[in-house]
Amino acid sequence: MFPSSDFFSGLRLAQRAHFPALAGGALVVLVLAAWMAAQFSARQPTTVALDVGFSAMRLLLPLVMVLMTQELLSREFDRRYFLSSLTYPRARHRLLLGRFAALAMLCLGLLLVMSVVLGLAVTLIGKGYEQVTPVSLGQPYLVAIAFLALDLLVLTALAAFLAMVASTPSFVLVGTFGFLLVARSFAAIVELLNRNAAVVADAEGYRAGIGTLGYLLPDLGALDVRMVALYGRLDFLPADWPWLVLGCLAYAFALLGLAVWALQRKRFA
């Protein structure tokens, strides 16, 4: 049975933690970033606005997600709310799954709103100016947003796991953004070293060391497929995108399973 009470309590906690204000601030930053980028672009203003908008969403959404994870999960133990929320015979995993569902719904809902607002902003920016290569806000845009949602799902599962094992809420922020930085960049670094070995000394050893991360982390950098929306061409998708999607989904569910396992074995003082 779905833990609905924990789901709705998570939504109430998010409201008390000023999620609407955070979401509104993120939307304002998104629109300002896209509009200012377009104003400073002499050519292709809608392409630049959409590109910067995607970059803003890939930064703002994880930030909002981590802040909400701290409130919905980390502070449950930091403020000792678990004395009432985990009373016997209630199963511990119900609390985690309910709060995770609330967190995922809030973040994916914010992603949906931001994608609509960005699409409207780009449409307004492009009025009166016809580009040679117009952006595509149809199916390619939806594909790019879907891949961004998968990226956010993996990060949300990681943040939930860190909230179960960390002793302080701040570690969730540091750990999630550290993971984000590495998982989004290691594949690009390996590709750079393959193309230009003169970038660093001992490029072979450096490449082998970073390449090991490919067996431990999902390639979140490959989920950034904004090019399909910027140029309206689905052939910009990675050749192995079905395996990429399945791998990231499996990684997210594995992290969520580890979070449940950690909570079941967590000892409370």
Image (cartoon, rainbow, N blue to C red):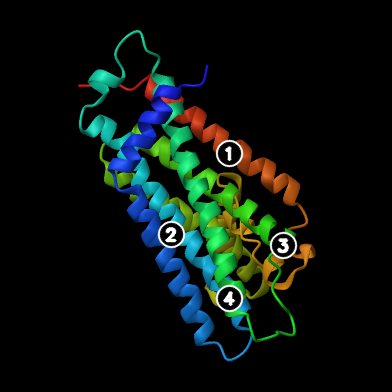
Q: Amino acid at mark 1?
A: Tyr
Q: Amino acid at mark 2?
A: Leu
The mark lying in front, picked from 4 and 2, is 4
Task: Check the image and report above or below for 230 versus 70.
Answer: below
Residue for badge 4: 124
Q: Are marks 4 and 3 in contact (CB under 8 Å)?
A: no
The mark lying in front, picked from 2 and 1, is 2
Is residue 188 rendered to the left or right of residue 39?
Answer: right
Q: Compare marks 3 and 1 and give the one earlier in the sequence.
A: 3
Distance (Cα) linking label 4 and label 2: 22 Å
Badge 1 element: helix
Q: Position of residue 231 (x, y in %)?
A: 72, 72
Q: Compare marks 4 and 2 and give the one earlier in the sequence.
A: 2
In the picture as drawn, the residue positioned furthest to the bottom comes out as 42
Q: Are marks 2 and 1 in contact (CB under 8 Å)?
A: no
Residue for badge 2: 60
Badge 3 element: loop
Distance (Cα) linking label 3 and label 1: 29 Å
Check disc 4: other Cα within 10 Å, few if <14, some if 14-19, many if 20+. few
Residue for badge 3: 138
The mark lying in front, picked from 3 and 2, is 3
- Identified at 31% across, 18% down, the residue is 86
The mark lying in front, picked from 4 and 3, is 4
Distance (Cα) linking label 2 and label 1: 22 Å
Distance (Cα) linking label 1 and label 4: 38 Å
Is residue 70 rendered to the left or right of residue 40?
Answer: left
Badge 4 element: helix
- Identified at 53% across, 68% down, the residue is 53
Q: Position of residue 110 (x, y in %)?
A: 48, 51
Check disc 2: other Cα within 10 Å, few if <14, some if 14-19, many if 20+. some
